[in-house]
Amino acid sequence: MGGVQVRKRRVSAPGAVYHGPMELDDDICYRAVTSRDARFDGRFFTAVRTTGIYCRPVCPAVTPRRKNVTFYACAAAAEQAGYRPCKRCRPEASPGTPAWLGTSSTVSRAVRCIAEGALDDGSVDDLAARLGLGPRQLTRLCERHLGTTPVRLAQTRRVHFARGLIEHSSLSMTQVALAAGFGSLRRFNTLLKATYGCAPRELRRRNCPISAPADAALATLACRLPYRPPYDWAQLAGFLRGRAIPGVEVADDDRYARTLALPDGRTGFLQVTPGAGDWLDLELALPDLTGAIALVARVRRMFDCGADPAAIADHLARDAALKPLVKRRPGLRLPSAFDPFELGVRAIVGQQVTVKAATTVTGRVAARCGRPLAEPRGALTHLFPAPGALANADLDGLGLTTQRARTLRTFAQAVADGTLELDTPRGPDEFAARLMALPGIGPWTAQYVALRAFGEPDAFPLGDLGLKHALPGVDLAARSTAWSPWRGYAALHLWAGLGD
């Protein structure tokens, strides 16, 4: 499975074919379609020329004839070619596609930035500048590797997110449009009708919406985060439970919840629980739902819903030491942080101390420097301190050494004044170099932040004592090269193996 390559085609109308550099074997794709193999769900999409519809490989409809189908790497490329999404298998409900992984690293990072809202408030020019290239070059790379443009990717993302809210919530159409990032209701109606061939309200009439829980003060959005099974929820929940910051986060076997400090100074909450199928249930409680799509994307990354566990396991199992660990936890995920700054503070506090000690001290920092909630929700009582507040805070008596307190203030000040951007559009190594330019931050902290703050799958905290204990006497620098591009997952397997 991990070795399947993707060929997508850019077409101007159904029937025209473009053979790009990403090669997907059409025979393998068609066999996956005929067998409805769920392992291929999200890897590609099947467009049927005779109907003008594109589907997931698991679509329950009658299998089309081989001569009538074309395969695409992503939904946006199929829609750009003039195809409409199937109303039975609902392509917008498929797991996040990894189709671009293994292509240009610039394209994969661009797609990730777009998925997290880079084009909601910014332009293609802004995104290209973050990636270190020009807008025309970025557009050409996306067309070459994905068969579509950055703008079309963002548009498809918003449309599909809106469809999910229409089907699985009781939100009004205005609320759906705002949550999905549309600037106007007219634009929302136009794109939904162009994509699905009917007005948004008709999509709701054909389905039974799930009512969202009511909240007297906050707007509530409930949605599903689909993933590719297996998913080791127990392992991920245990990882988060041991690191939950008191007052800011709550984690147990059945849920994860936390407070949210929103950019405009307002507050909110989120809660994630395992769903009844191959998805997680997310509930957001916000002052209003404008731009909620970006928050949902951050939670998807936090819970690693876009991973392809089969491909990762197949690759890592080639190492004899990792093989039994991978077999024991086939659905292991990489838990990243909702807030990169929060994770950076956690990593600095955790230098050369145990996980339990780091959690305790970070909780003290949050209690002293964070803003208390006017209306707490159970154990959720505080917002994590903002960079500016922490930069000028009194950290004496919290259990921090003088040097570590100084490093925390320096880090917080660099983030507050914009000297350090918490972003990895040019890769984890470039970010690590910028972070290590600050005094008191070494390679372990930088790589750990890249791994946990941004979910960088190939970040690897080489000097970690736990990793050295997991593979004693092994040259990790040399051994880990074979684990790329998933060295981060290898680290998680090794840490989990220590618990065994």
Image: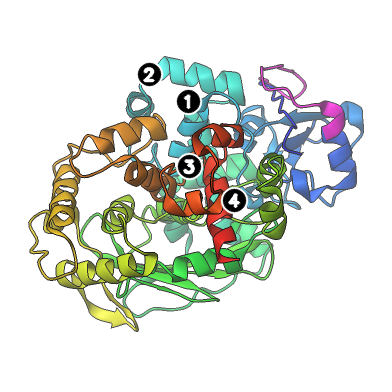
The residues tagged by marks 2 and 4 sit, at their Cα atoms, a distance apart of 39 Å
Q: CA distance from mark 4 to mark 3?
A: 25 Å
Is 14 magenta? The answer is: yes
Where, by quadrant of the figure, is residue 50 drawn? top right
Secondary structure state at the residue bearing disc 2: loop
Q: Earlier in the sequence, mark 4 or mark 3?
A: 3
Q: Position of residue 165 (x, y in %)?
A: 54, 59
Closer to viewer: mark 4 or mark 3: 3
Does the rendering let one see residue 57? Answer: yes
Nearer to us in this view, 258 or 167: 258
Using the numbered discs, state the Cα–Cα distance from disc 1 to disc 4 in whole angstroms: 36 Å
At horizontal 45% and vertical 20% (from top left) the residue drawn is 138
Location of the C terminus (image quadrant): bottom right
Closer to viewer: mark 2 or mark 3:
2
From the top left corner, tell me how far across and down residue 259 is, in percent: 33, 68
Which residue sits at x=12%, y=53%? 391
- Dot 1 falls on a residue whose secondary structure is helix
Real-space Cα separation, disc 2 to disc 3, in angstroms:
19 Å
Which range of residues does the magenta coloring cover?
Answer: 11-28
The numbered disc on residue 115 is 3
Closer to the camera, 362 or 499? 499
Dot 3 or dot 1, earlier in sequence: 1
N-terminal label among 2 and 1: 1
Residue 24 percent coordinates (x, y): 75, 27
Q: Can you identify the residue that label 2 sits on? A: 133
Q: Which residue is mark 1?
A: 106
Q: Which residue is mark 4?
A: 199
Kind of residue at disc 4: Ala
Residue type indicated by callout 1: Thr
